[in-house]
Image (spheres, grey):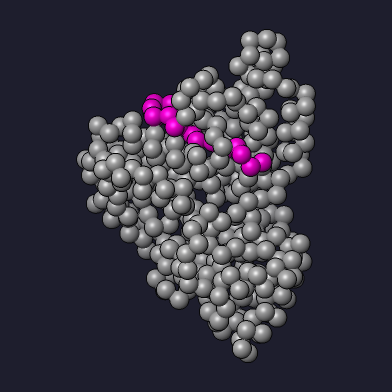
Amino acid sequence: MIYLDYSATTPVNKEVLDTFTKVCIDFPGNSNSLHKLGVKIRDLENSATKQIAQILNIKPSEIIYTSGSSESNNLAIKGICLKHQGIGKHIVTTNLEHSSIYGPIGYLQKLGYTVDFVKTKNGIVDIEDLKKLVTDDTVLVTIASVNSETGITQNIEEIAKVLKDKNCYFHVDMTQSIGKINIKLDDIDLVSFSAHKFFGLKGIGCLIKKENITLEPLIHGGKSTTIYRSGTPAHPLIVSISKALRLAVTNLDDKYNDVKKLNDYLKDNLSKYEKVTINSNENCIPNILNISVLNIKPETLQHALEEYDIYISTQSACSANNSISKAVLEVTNNEECAKHSVRISISNITTKEEIDKFLEAFDIIYQKFDKM
């Protein structure tokens, strides 16, 4: 199997899985229990939380454990807007967000909130337009650091500085960047991410909430690791996400450079085809390469590659089954490219041999459909 869909989910690192299994077996129980075993489990949780905080340069008290990025995004958006209605009912976002951003925003619109979409240039947020859109009624600005389809990477630090003196909150969906690139979390109020994007287990994610900020919880009732998310703490998953994050950031620059070399190699080879357009530009993370093959429907190419046991994606894995990619249209301003886009996503464990086999299969498929 040649797996080229790492932005949808990554395979679990064996060390992370071993950690999860060991904690499950050796530490049954509940960290909220008052007996000695409960205290040991609570110490494990606290140790994991401290490690995450150290890696991200935040405070342990600022970490809220969730089931993943979708829950984190919902908690951030609904939690801020419902808690701080006194500020206003205006939200600013982009046309490059994940469905778990648009979903809660759509829910809030039914409650009377308004939303504006900031303009972009080649996919990058137009800072001047952002300044114009943020008003005294703006309660939240939510912008992803990396778009999951195209890999477009925003200048989050610059945006954070612009919003620092504004009377609104800044949320960043970092699902596609945590564990892949370095981003300072200074001046960002809320950050979402999920373990399964950096070789961790599904079912665990985090919402980073700076300590001076309050939220309206989505889940009420019962003691947990925080007052903002009730429920029995999933301590094996908490320890495992800490392990996954530590492994992900180890030698991060070397991993980034390895991925970039593969990305460049892919682009060089795919650019030779007359009916292939590279949609990911110089502002994109190398882990994601979005292309359009204008003579093949996206789902047809995807299924044709399956015959060679090769797996890529059409749009984001969580996207609705639409015929056009909203994100690609935003970046390219080309409807044909948006209709024919596919995503190839790689990682530091992807090999050149795998890329070569993909290119061989791609060539056979391309030639076949080009003749047709």
Residue drawn at the location 33% of the way across and 43% of the way down: 108
Query: Quadrant location of residue 342?
Result: bottom right
Quadrant where the N terminus lies?
bottom right
In x, y percent, where is residue 82? 33, 34
Residue 207 lies in the magenta-colored region: yes
In x, y percent, where is residue 286? 58, 60
Quadrant where the C terminus lies?
bottom right
Query: Quadrant location of residue 27?
Result: top right
Q: Nearer the viewer, residue 271 or 338?
A: 338
Residue drawn at the location 32% of the way across and 55% of the way down: 118
Say whether residue 324 is left or right of residue 65. Answer: left
Residue drawn at the location 42% of the way across and 37% of the way down: 76
In x, y percent, where is residue 30? 65, 20
Say whether residue 149 is left or right of residue 188. Answer: right
- Residue 78 visible (yes or no): yes
Q: Residue furthest bottom?
A: 371
Say whether residue 250 is left or right of residue 79. Answer: right
Q: Nearer the viewer, residue 362 or 170?
A: 362
Residue drawn at the location 44% of the way across and 40% of the way down: 74
Q: Residue furthest top?
A: 35
Q: Considering only vertical position in the picture, is 32 above or below 366? A: above
Say whether residue 36 is left or right of residue 137. Answer: right
**Magenta highlight: main SS:** loop
- Residue 163 visible (yes or no): no
Q: Which residues are magenta?
A: 201-218
In x, y percent, where is residue 247? 69, 41
Residue 353 lies in the magenta-colored region: no
